[in-house]
Amino acid sequence: MNIKISPSILSADLCSLGRDIKLTEEAGADYLHFDVMDGVFVNNISYGIPVLQSVRKNTDLVLDVHLMITEPHRFIRAFADSGADIITFHSEAESDIEGTVKLIRECGKKAAVAIKPATPVESIYKYINDVDMILIMTVEPGFGGQGFIYETVDKISALRKYTESRGIDLDIQVDGGINAETADIVRKAGANVLVAGSYFYKAADKEKAVGILRGNV
């Protein structure tokens, strides 16, 4: 299984974001995870389109944009035009899932659907033929640095078994509380795209941190 690492710049030093992006590239990460929060869908506010445009100008990394916002369909084209490569929105948000996926596709981007820890994984099975990736949140969305919710591991396993039984090649992403210990757990459960924020950006040796997250160290 091809393991991909997507450091979340929610945990980067925004005053030195260009430097931290460069360090992310040099560490061998695959993606750059870009969290968008509106203070409505989740109880926090992060950054949006102007920051994404600046990031796009400064990196060739795949920009993995995670929309934690209400009515995400209203902003798909704007994020696509601003440099997103993958656009993830929540099944619990107030948007038609099939219509939003179609809109992302029309913009020429990869589409992904996310679910919160309390959302049954079976609720998104019917969309797995339409998306490139499913994101299973392993913490409650909204804030970095939270503790991993171990009950979510069963959802990862169930989704991987379901896709494999149907011969579907689907990326399963996990986001929240990912470190050396939990990375091993989620990889074994079937996740292959790992978002890491605090663990990666606080690491003295970021290249080693990527290797540990991949399971190579």
Image (tube, helix red, strand yellow):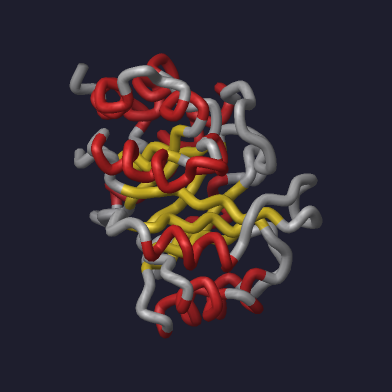
State the image coordinates of residue 212 (x, y, percent, origin top left).
Answer: 28, 21
Visible in this render: residue 173?
A: yes
Asked if residue 7 lies left or right of residue 27, the reply is: right
Residue placed most toward the observer, 160 or 22: 22
The residue located at (37%, 67%) in the rendering is 110
Query: On the image, which quarter does residue 92 sit in?
Result: bottom right
Asked if residue 29 lies left or right of residue 110, the reply is: left
Residue placed most toward the observer, 113 or 124: 113
State the image coordinates of residue 61 (x, y, percent, origin top left).
Answer: 30, 54
Please tell me whether residue 10 is drawn above or below residue 48 in the rendered image: above
Residue at the outermost bottom position: 106
State the image coordinates of residue 166 (x, y, percent, origin top left).
Answer: 29, 55
Residue placed most toward the observer, 118 or 213: 213
Asked if residue 34 lies left or right of residue 187, the reply is: right
The residue located at (42%, 84%) in the rendering is 106
Please tell me whether residue 86 is drawn above or below residue 5 in the rendered image: below
The residue located at (33%, 50%) in the rendering is 171
State the image coordinates of residue 210 (x, y, percent, origin top left).
Answer: 29, 28
Asked if residue 180 lies left or right of residue 82, the reply is: left
The residue located at (40%, 20%) in the rendering is 203
- Total residue callouts: 0
Visible in this render: residue 161?
A: no
Please tell me whether residue 114 is drawn above or below residue 184 in the rendered image: below
Please tell me whether residue 97 is drawn above or below residue 215 in the rendered image: below
Query: On the image, which quarter does residue 209 sit in?
Result: top left
Check the picture and name the quadrant holding the C terminus: top left
Check the picture and name the quadrant holding the N terminus: top left
Query: On the image, which quarter does residue 85 sit in?
Result: bottom left
Residue placed most toward the observer, 25 or 137: 25
